[in-house]
Image: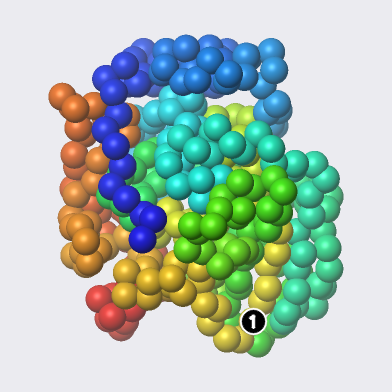
Amino acid sequence: MLIRTPSDILSSEITPESVYLKRRQFMQGIGIGATALGLGLPATGLAASEDPRKDLEFSPVVAKADNPFYTDENMPSFAQASSYNNFYEFGTDKTDPAKNAHTLTTDPWSVQVEGDVAKPGSYPLEDIMKLMTLEERIYRLRCVEAWSMVIPWVGFSLAEFIKMFGPTSNAKYVEFTTLYRRSEMKGQRSAFSVIDWPYTEGLRMDEAMHPLAFMSVGMYGKTLPNQNGAPIRLVVPWKYGFKSIKSIVKMRFTSIRPKTSWQGIAPEEYGFYANVNPEVSHPRWSQAYERRLPSSLLSPSRIKTEMFNGYGEQVAGLYKGMNLRRHY
């Protein structure tokens, strides 16, 4: 298996508290090149003037304790969140996506919609963006490898997006597919890859239509960097991170539960639902605790994992009567 326990983050990678408290100024005033200097990232990183990301117009999240779209928990800097990733299309090490994803072409981009819908077809992203209202959501992201981050995403409701296509009563699931382009995605050319490309994921329709399910086109106030799933990705905050598929090119609505990539590789380790559950260990490690980034050797930020990643009040009803040990 290629999934591994993440390496420790150096103390030099911790963002000062003052940066967290001035998050919006930080988002607007600092670029990847400037932040990279403080993190020891490769000198070949982009300077702020060369940053290809674009500013987005969106409704800021309402900072209220009872708002499920918001948390005031500490966030990593943009540089850390964009340089510590799982995106096997560009390599298996955490730093590989940031090093290799510059080869990805994201414009033009379309999402192919097919299956049990009234309006199948190829939808250019630029047209989608004109129809959707962008908003900010600050979600916890919990990786199956037992590390986590808090990310300020920008995007739109998956439910509202799905309504555009008019799913029929036969649509019980939606399958998502990542771009397959070996010429631009180094990991897809690897002879050692265990993934049968392209990468696929899926949700039950009631999960997909849940208000928390989100399609992201940006983070930290700007368009997504390639390594984080540009130009459009899924964010399902109550599930392990591998469910939040990146660089989506196809959505297929079907009556049959799709077989997802990691489930196909190791079904005893990665189930279809992949709900965050501290009571169900991975066969090779416990899920009871997680390491919240940023962290360091001296301050590992080890915290207890919450059921459904802390979103149980909103989503537990989706799984009423199910055995979540069996349906992991």
**Residue 25: where, in percent of width, then height?**
52, 15
Q: How many numbered tags mark residues here?
A: 1
Q: In which quarter of the image is residue 80?
A: top left
**Residue 121: where, in percent of width, then height?**
84, 68
**Left or right of 101, for residue 301:** left
Q: Label 1, on which residue?
A: 254
**Residue 250: where, in percent of width, then height?**
70, 64
Amino acid of disc 1: Thr
Give the answer, above or below, for where 95 lies relative to 164: above
Can you say which quadrant of the picture contains the N terminus? bottom left
**Left or right of 177, for residue 120:** right
Can you say which quadrant of the picture contains the C terminus? bottom left
Q: Nearer the viewer, residue 58 or 103?
A: 103
**Left or right of 150, for residue 112:** right
Q: Which of 173 and 12 is in front in this view?
A: 12
Q: Provide the secondary structure element on which disc 1 rests.
A: strand
**Residue 136: where, in percent of width, then height?**
56, 39
Q: Residue at horizontal 28%, vertical 80%? A: 326
Look at the image and tell me whether residue 157 can be seen: no
Give the answer, above or below, for where 84 lies relative to 282: above
Mark 1 closeness class: few <14, some 14–19, many ≥20 residues within 10 Å:
many
Q: Residue at horizontal 36%, vertical 54%? A: 3
Look at the image and tell me whether residue 280 can be seen: yes
Q: Quadrant of residue 320?
A: bottom left
Q: In which quarter of the image is residue 19?
A: top left
Q: Residue at horizontal 49%, vertical 27%? A: 78
Q: Nearer the viewer, residue 203 or 159?
A: 203
